[in-house]
Image (cartoon, rainbow, N blue to C red):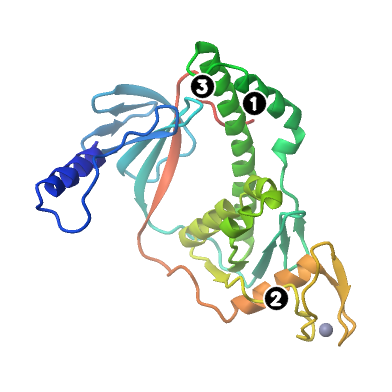
């Protein structure tokens, strides 16, 4: 509600000529069908054990996804397009401590194998859409046959939105588990900066990539590294990580995407393409700066789902 007030204030001072810079447009309302959010500051909400009270809305029954570590300073209510409600709390936390270790890891993200670690470990991503592509086609065909704005259209739209919600949950679950594992096991984590938006412009790759969630994975790693005082580094995507022999440093030139294994012309080392890249990412990370400072208080968000008939978002 505060955000809306500010938006109107900006608009009015702008029309009166009191505001410098570009004229400000009146606030726009989001389509009711898209994701909607509302923020409540201190005094505007109260947290109980099974219920949260929100000013002007009332009490909501909630399902906690995890415990709040301390008193929250604000809460955002999010309604997604599948009519599911989520509450996101802002809380101050002191960094938690994980035992320090001497492990470092470089991570190569790919399409065929989601992540290849510099220790040779390969992790495949779940492909929820691939498994359910028939259902997806059926749902979207059914939606396109309905008249926009009709009751049946709305019902069908909700079904499609719920389907997407489930795919997203499967992906998020996987990314959470993998990032936690990597943060637990390593002190230094190096990732290659990915030009995701540039790659998504390539239509052939676009669906596969947005299905993978590279960006979300990076965000999760960074957040957990901050929380547990790990050293998270990102190297430039211009580093020739897949072209250089990790054994002798010889530059072999660009490899076609289909070449999965190669032999160094200089030292004869045999390489798995992704593992070699992951090792080079780790080495390049040694020369780059850490992305997160250590210690101190920082903000994090804890999420909880508000209970209504469609809110169970786990376990797709
Ligand atoms: Zn070599």
User: Residue 132: in sight, yes or no?
Assistant: no
Marks 1/2: CA–CA distance: 43 Å
> Element at badge 3?
loop
Q: Where residue 16 sits: x, y (%)?
A: 9, 47
Reading the image, the residue beneath label 2 is 280
> Which of 269 and 159 lies nearest the eye of the viewer?
159
Residue 244 placement (x, y as % from top left): 75, 79
Residue 97 visible in the shown view: yes
- Could you tell me which quadrant the N terminus lies in? top left
The numbered disc on residue 310 is 3
**121 displayed left or right of 219:** right
Q: What separation in Å lies between label 1 and label 3 (alpha carbons)?
A: 20 Å
Q: Secondary structure at mark 1?
A: helix
* Percent x, y of residue 154: 51, 18
Question: Do the residues under discs 1 and 2 have CB atoms within 8 angstroms?
Answer: no
Residue 302, relative to residue 56: is it above or below? below
Q: Label 1: which residue?
A: 140
Q: Nearer the viewer, mark 1 or mark 2?
A: 1
């Amino acid at each position: 509600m505060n955000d809306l007030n500010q938006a109107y204030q900006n608009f009015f001072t702008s029309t009166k000529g009191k505001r410098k810079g570009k004229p400000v447009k009146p606030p726009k309302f989001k389509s009711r069908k898209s994701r909607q959010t509302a923020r409540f500051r201190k005094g505007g909400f109260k947290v109980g054990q099974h219920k949260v009270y929100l000013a002007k809305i009332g009490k909501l029954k909630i399902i906690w996804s995890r415990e709040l570590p301390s008193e929250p300073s604000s809460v955002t209510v999010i309604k997604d397009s599948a009519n599911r409600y989520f509450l996101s709390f802002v809380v101050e936390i002191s960094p938690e401590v994980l035992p320090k270790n001497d492990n470092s890891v470089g991570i190569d993200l790919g399409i065929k194998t989601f992540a290849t670690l510099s220790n040779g470990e390969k992790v495949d991503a779940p492909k929820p859409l691939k498994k359910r592509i028939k259902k997806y086609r059926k749902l979207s065909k059914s939606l396109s046959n309905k008249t926009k704005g009709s009751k049946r259209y709305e019902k069908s739209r909700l079904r499609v939105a719920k389907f997407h919600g489930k795919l997203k949950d499967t992906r998020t679950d996987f990314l959470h588990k993998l990032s936690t594992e990597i943060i637990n096991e390593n002190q230094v984590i190096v990732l290659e900066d990915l030009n995701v938006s540039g790659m998504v412009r390539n239509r052939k790759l676009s669906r596969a990539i947005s299905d993978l969630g590279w960006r979300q994975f990076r965000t999760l790693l960074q957040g957990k590294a901050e929380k547990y005082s790990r050293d998270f580094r990102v190297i430039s995507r211009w580093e020739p990580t897949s072209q250089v022999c990790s054994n002798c440093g010889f530059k072999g030139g660009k490899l076609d995407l289909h070449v999965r294994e190669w032999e160094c012309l200089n030292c004869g080392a045999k390489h798995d393409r992704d593992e070699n890249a992951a090792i080079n990412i780790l080495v390049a990370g040694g020369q780059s700066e850490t992305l997160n400072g250590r210690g101190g208080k920082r903000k994090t968000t804890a999420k909880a789902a508000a209970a209504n008939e469609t809110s169970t978002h786990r376990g797709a």
